[in-house]
Amino acid sequence: MLYVTTYFWERVLRVSGEASDEKAMTGDTHLRAELYLRGDTYGTFDAQQQVLNRVKRLEANGVFSESMVAGEWQRIRTMAEDKRSEAIQTYEEFKDWARENGHSLEPAFERRNRSYVGMDRVDDVVVFPVVSLAIYDSDDLEGVFPCSDEERTYTVGDALEAFERGDEHWLAQFDSLSVDRTDPLLEPGVDATI
């Protein structure tokens, strides 16, 4: 059961597991999944809870060895208003991966300008999706979901289904991007138990 002590229960779910040299999902390479859930939306709690339950089942079945709920992820972030730059840094890391793979983060992630009535001020903002998932192998970013190419959109559900059916080659369709971290950029921000 998920216990949260704050209304905005946004978090990063960090999940660790095993994968092979060919970016497969079984073998001897350490996989980490970071699941980002937004808490400033109405009517999405049940769907987000279902995603958490799927990850919990994958952990119970030995696909992932660890899961931790932590962090914050708001709908809109600006460089000027965000006192923590980690959300934007995470987005930039995801964007770099997408560019390397010939993919786009849109329409799930949206970068746009926000203006204010009666003011000359315009901010560059990122609108984050309700659910997103990043898969890491040590300090290599293997995949970000949702993402899209010219032919299709790869959803969080697609990634979870691949793990659930034990598809060892599903991640191999994506090129990895080396990043300089092995833990989520977003610090734990809520007390929660999964």
Image (cartoon, rainbow, N blue to C red):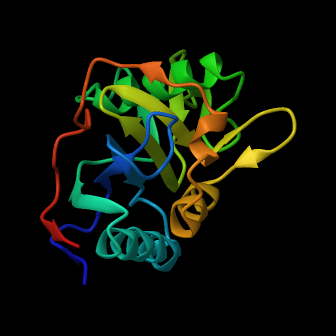
Query: From the viewer's perspective, is residue 137 above or below residue 97?
Result: below
Q: Position of residue 11 (x, y in %)?
A: 30, 55
Q: Position of residue 26 (x, y in %)?
A: 43, 52
Query: From the viewer's perspective, is residue 178 above or below residue 140?
Result: above
Query: From the viewer's perspective, is residue 18 above or below residue 151?
Result: below
Query: From the viewer's perspective, is residue 52 above or below residue 76?
Result: below
Q: Position of residue 96 (x, y in %)?
A: 53, 18
The reply to whether residue 78 is visible in this rendering is no
- Is 153 left or right of 92, judged from the image as shown? right
Foreground residue among 157 and 79: 157
Question: Residue at coordinates 24% horizontally, 48% vertically from top-left?
Answer: 71
Residue ranking furthest to the bottom: 1
Residue ranking furthest to the right: 151
Question: Residue at coordinates 23% horizontally, 73% vertically from top-left?
Answer: 194
Question: Residue at coordinates 35% horizontally, 44% vertically from top-left?
Answer: 31
Q: Position of residue 86 (x, y in %)?
A: 29, 29
Question: Residue at coordinates 87% horizontally, 39% vertically from top-left?
Answer: 151
> Where does the N terminus fall, quadrant-wise?
bottom left
- Which quadrant would residue 30 be assigned to in this image? top left
- Is 78 left or right of 175, judged from the image as shown? left
- Number of marks drawn: 0
Foreground residue among 112 and 57: 57
The reply to whether residue 6 is visible in this rendering is yes
Foreground residue among 61 and 109: 61
